[in-house]
Image (cartoon, helix red, strand yellow):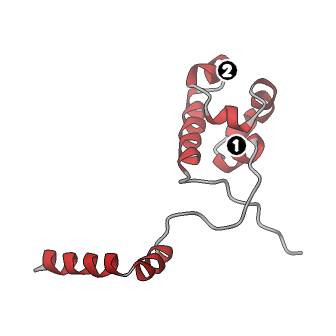
Amino acid sequence: MAMRHFLSLNKSLLSSPSNSLSWLANFSSKSSPYAVKVGIPEFLNGVGKGVEAHVEKLESEIGDFQKLLVTRTLKLKKLQIPCKHRKLILKYAHKYRLGLWRPRAEPVKSK
Protein backbone atom coordinates (compact mmCIF):
# COMPACT_ATOMS: atom_id res chain seq x y z
CA MET A 1 0.00 0.00 0.00
CA ALA A 2 2.71 2.46 0.98
CA MET A 3 4.81 1.47 -2.02
CA ARG A 4 1.88 2.07 -4.37
CA HIS A 5 1.37 5.54 -2.86
CA PHE A 6 5.07 6.31 -3.19
CA LEU A 7 5.12 5.24 -6.84
CA SER A 8 2.06 7.33 -7.68
CA LEU A 9 3.67 10.33 -5.97
CA ASN A 10 6.84 9.86 -8.03
CA LYS A 11 4.83 9.61 -11.26
CA SER A 12 2.97 12.81 -10.48
CA LEU A 13 6.21 14.65 -9.71
CA LEU A 14 7.90 13.42 -12.86
CA SER A 15 4.93 14.15 -15.10
CA SER A 16 4.91 17.91 -14.43
CA PRO A 17 8.45 19.36 -14.63
CA SER A 18 7.55 22.81 -13.29
CA ASN A 19 5.99 21.30 -10.18
CA SER A 20 9.05 19.12 -9.48
CA LEU A 21 11.45 22.06 -9.75
CA SER A 22 9.56 24.12 -7.19
CA TRP A 23 9.44 21.12 -4.87
CA LEU A 24 13.16 20.56 -5.30
CA ALA A 25 13.98 24.20 -4.54
CA ASN A 26 12.29 23.93 -1.15
CA PHE A 27 14.37 20.93 -0.09
CA SER A 28 17.78 21.94 -1.37
CA SER A 29 20.78 21.02 0.78
CA LYS A 30 22.89 23.93 -0.41
CA SER A 31 24.09 26.52 2.07
CA SER A 32 22.80 30.05 2.24
CA PRO A 33 23.04 32.10 -0.98
CA TYR A 34 25.49 34.78 0.21
CA ALA A 35 28.87 34.78 -1.50
CA VAL A 36 32.04 34.91 0.57
CA LYS A 37 35.48 35.10 -0.96
CA VAL A 38 37.27 32.11 0.49
CA GLY A 39 41.00 32.09 1.03
CA ILE A 40 43.23 30.07 3.32
CA PRO A 41 42.58 32.29 6.42
CA GLU A 42 38.78 32.24 5.94
CA PHE A 43 38.81 28.50 5.36
CA LEU A 44 40.87 27.70 8.45
CA ASN A 45 38.85 30.09 10.61
CA GLY A 46 35.71 28.38 9.37
CA VAL A 47 37.10 24.98 10.37
CA GLY A 48 38.06 26.31 13.82
CA LYS A 49 39.24 23.93 16.57
CA GLY A 50 42.74 25.45 16.67
CA VAL A 51 43.47 24.91 12.97
CA GLU A 52 43.61 28.67 12.41
CA ALA A 53 47.00 28.71 14.16
CA HIS A 54 48.58 27.40 10.94
CA VAL A 55 47.44 30.23 8.65
CA GLU A 56 50.88 31.84 8.21
CA LYS A 57 52.62 28.51 7.65
CA LEU A 58 50.11 27.35 5.01
CA GLU A 59 50.00 30.70 3.22
CA SER A 60 53.79 30.85 2.94
CA GLU A 61 54.29 27.21 1.86
CA ILE A 62 51.15 26.47 -0.18
CA GLY A 63 50.10 29.99 -1.07
CA ASP A 64 46.90 29.39 -3.00
CA PHE A 65 43.56 28.17 -1.65
CA GLN A 66 43.00 25.93 -4.69
CA LYS A 67 46.33 24.22 -3.97
CA LEU A 68 45.25 23.70 -0.35
CA LEU A 69 42.13 21.89 -1.55
CA VAL A 70 44.23 19.27 -3.37
CA THR A 71 47.07 19.06 -0.85
CA ARG A 72 47.83 15.59 0.48
CA THR A 73 48.45 14.56 4.05
CA LEU A 74 52.22 14.02 3.58
CA LYS A 75 52.67 17.62 2.45
CA LEU A 76 50.85 18.82 5.59
CA LYS A 77 52.93 16.43 7.70
CA LYS A 78 56.15 17.88 6.26
CA LEU A 79 54.88 21.31 7.35
CA GLN A 80 54.69 19.89 10.91
CA ILE A 81 50.93 20.28 11.25
CA PRO A 82 49.61 17.94 13.99
CA CYS A 83 47.63 14.86 12.97
CA LYS A 84 44.31 16.10 14.41
CA HIS A 85 44.59 19.37 12.49
CA ARG A 86 45.63 17.58 9.27
CA LYS A 87 42.53 15.39 9.52
CA LEU A 88 40.28 18.41 10.00
CA ILE A 89 41.85 20.32 7.10
CA LEU A 90 41.53 17.35 4.74
CA LYS A 91 37.99 16.53 5.88
CA TYR A 92 36.69 20.06 5.36
CA ALA A 93 38.63 20.48 2.10
CA HIS A 94 36.88 17.39 0.76
CA LYS A 95 33.48 18.69 1.90
CA TYR A 96 34.23 22.08 0.31
CA ARG A 97 35.17 20.48 -3.02
CA LEU A 98 31.89 18.55 -3.03
CA GLY A 99 29.91 21.69 -2.21
CA LEU A 100 28.64 20.33 1.10
CA TRP A 101 30.29 22.92 3.34
CA ARG A 102 31.37 26.55 3.19
CA PRO A 103 32.89 28.76 5.87
CA ARG A 104 30.34 31.10 7.40
CA ALA A 105 30.53 34.82 6.82
CA GLU A 106 31.37 36.81 9.92
CA PRO A 107 28.14 38.30 11.26
CA VAL A 108 28.01 42.10 11.44
CA LYS A 109 28.04 43.15 15.09
CA SER A 110 25.60 45.89 15.97
CA LYS A 111 26.77 48.54 18.41
Name the quadrant containing residue 43. Answer: top right
Relative image position of residue 106 (x, y in whole percent) = 76, 61
Residue at point 77% right, 35% down?
A: 55
Q: In this orientation, which residue lies closer to the viewer: 46 or 102?
A: 102
Residue at point 26% right, 77% down?
A: 11
Give the left or right position of residue 14, taking residue 72 as reference. left
> If you read the primary sequence from the N terminus, does the residue marked by circle 2 or circle 1 appear first?
1
- The quadrant the C terminus occupies is bottom right
CA distance separating discs 2 and 1: 16 Å
Q: Estimate how packed mark 1 is, as few (under 14), some (14 to 19) or many (20 or more) residues with alpha carbons within 10 Å.
A: many
Name the quadrant containing residue 17. Answer: bottom left
Relative image position of residue 31 (x, y in whole percent) = 59, 63
Disc marking residue 80: 2
- Disc 2 marks which amino acid? Gln
Q: In this orientation, which residue lies closer to the viewer: 97 or 12?
A: 12
Q: State the residue position of label 1.
A: 44
- Disc 1 marks which amino acid? Leu
